[in-house]
Structures are given as C-alpha cells and as structure tokens.
Amino acid sequence: MPLLGAHMSIAGGYYKAVDAAASFGMDTCQLFTKNNNQWRGKPLSDDDVRLFREALDRTGIQRPCGHNSYLINVASPDDVLWQRSLDALVEELQRAERLGLAGLVMHPGSFVASTPEAGLERIARALDDVHRATKGFQCQLWLELTAGQGSCLGCRFEEIAWLLEHVRQSDRLGVCVDTCHIFAAGYPLATEADCRRTLAELDRVIGLDRVRAFHLNDSKKGLGSRVDRHEHIGEGCIGLDAFRFLLNDKRLREMPMYLETKKETRGGEEMDAVNMRTLRSLTAAPPAKAQAKRAAPRTSRTARR
C-alpha cells in the first residue's frame, strides 16, 4: 500500500498538522514550513521541533514532507527576485531539515519574460547554490511536475530530466508527480491503458526510481488544458480509474501520496475524510468496467432461465 495523506494546516503549531492527519486515519502528511505567503517565517523554536517529532512518534505518521512558498521563483530572470527566492529556499530547506521532513516539494519556477532554456539554467544554478549552503542535509528537494500555466517550467518530463542531469548533486533531488498537473499538461490518465503509457513515459524520461511522492488530485479542467485546478477524487476530468491504478501498482508500494484537494465540508463531513475513504475503497479493487463485464454474463444467464 502507498502511504496516504494530505496537505494539513500548521495553524496553532506544526504538531497540529500531524494530529489532524492522524484523526482522518492518514499514514502521512504534507505541510508548509512557514506562512506560504510571506518571504520569511518566524524562527522555529525547540518546542516547535520537539512537539512535532513527539506527534510523529505518538501517531505513527510516516514520511511527512513540506511544500515551499509559492512566492519563490528560482527561474526568474530578475536578479533581485532570483536572489531573494534562493535565500528563501535555503531557509525553507533548513526548516524542513530541522523538523525531520523527508522532502521539500518545490515548483521549478517560471521563466517570465526570458526563455525556457534560460529559466532552466537559472533553476539549476539556484539548486547548486542551495545544495552548497545545506551541505550534509538529509531532507531532499522534490521537483514537482507542473500543469504548465503561463511560463511555468516543469510541465514536460524532459524539463525535469534536464534538471536532474545538470544539477551537480542530483542525488539530493527527487520528483513529485501531481496527477492534476500532468493531466492538465497533456499526459493522459483517464483509463488504465492511459496510466500505463504515461507511467512508461515517465519511467523512460525521468525514471520511476527518482519519484519520491505523488500529489493525488483530480482535475477540474480537461486533458492538456494547462490549467491547474484541483478537484475532489473522482469528481473531475480524470476519474477514478487512474487513482485505482496508481494505488494498486506494485512499483508504488509505500510511496507517500498526498491529497491537495479543497478543504471544505459536505453534509457535515470534512472532504478530507470523504477523499480518504474513496482512495481506500480503490485499493485492490478492479475497475468498474471489469466488474460490469463479469456481472453481465451472470445477469444474462439468469434472464434466460
């Protein structure tokens, strides 16, 4: 089984994210290392770290990860913004390391008014600088595949592969696959056959051995839309078969998979609970079409009798 979890709030303390994940029966969780709309965060205290780690021990939550601030853009052609982004990324990795997170998910960045090639060069340079500033860290940076909105990089497997090849300490990098993002970027997932082809392409270009995590999100928009809009599991354009396939793929056993769906209630129930229940129901379950095919002959024979 993969490790199932979701992005959880750190309001009131980092340990709150762990306790909330456990209350929904999750195996893991993702969190921000600070306010994601601010460049700098309040310094981590010894109590912050102690309470967080105690919560992990108490609940059994495994392989928590962080997600960096959306303000950071290490692909920027603007030298001031690039340096500010670099400094912020170093700080976030320091915070993630201190908390003991397995990885820090980061969007590669946006090339804005430059070119994709120039943007990728800026990212590689930034990652080299981050690694030099965080020598000996265990926490990895996980490059997230994106939907490709505007000038965002990382929507093609080849762009992530280029970064893995050109960053000097590439062994300190992993990859995070977001189902909504890759679908919106043009990689089909709606059927089991689609999933097999897309994962085969991912393995060929990047390598499944480089994937450290998945974000499980359905998509509000269609295949190749380049629009990043997450939807609850089974309620978007991807549908349930993709998630069934991923959850039962033997190559993805023990892979942490995090929901990033909207925090809301429906009928008095938190949608995190609903989405988790949906995902659990898909494990080791055959596709609906296969169930229908098996059921059809039995119905037909009964009718003839």
Image (tube, helix red, strand yellow):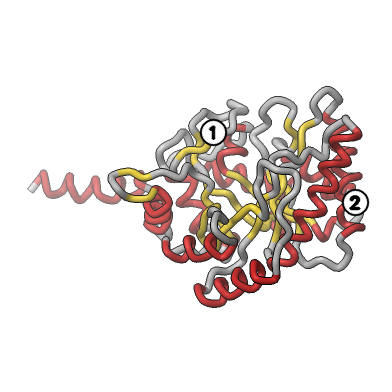
The location of residue 172, given as percent across then percent down, is 81, 59
Q: Is residue 290 above or below residue 221?
A: below
Give the residue at the far top of this rendering: 113
Q: Is residue 164 left or right of residue 266?
A: right
N-term-proximal mark, 1 vs 2: 2
Task: Say which amino acid is labelled 2.
Answer: Asp
Structural distance between the alpha carbons of marks 1 and 2:
31 Å
Dot 1, how many residues are within 10 Å of its Cα: few (below 14), some (14-19), or many (20+)? some
Give the residue number, with chain letter if any, for mark 2.
Answer: 128
Element type at marker 2?
helix
Q: Secondary structure at mark 1?
A: loop
Q: How far across and how far down the image is residue 46, in percent? A: 70, 71
The amino acid type of the residue labelled 1 equals Arg
Q: Please report the residue visible at 46 percent of the width from the left and 66 percent of the height from the top.
A: 22
Residue at horizontal 77%, vertical 57%? Answer: 93
Q: Which mark is residue 229?
A: 1
- Relative to 47, residue 247 above or below: above
Rendering quarter of residue 13: bottom right
Q: Position of residue 92 (x, y in %)?
A: 75, 54
Q: Residue at x 79, y 26 (%)?
A: 112
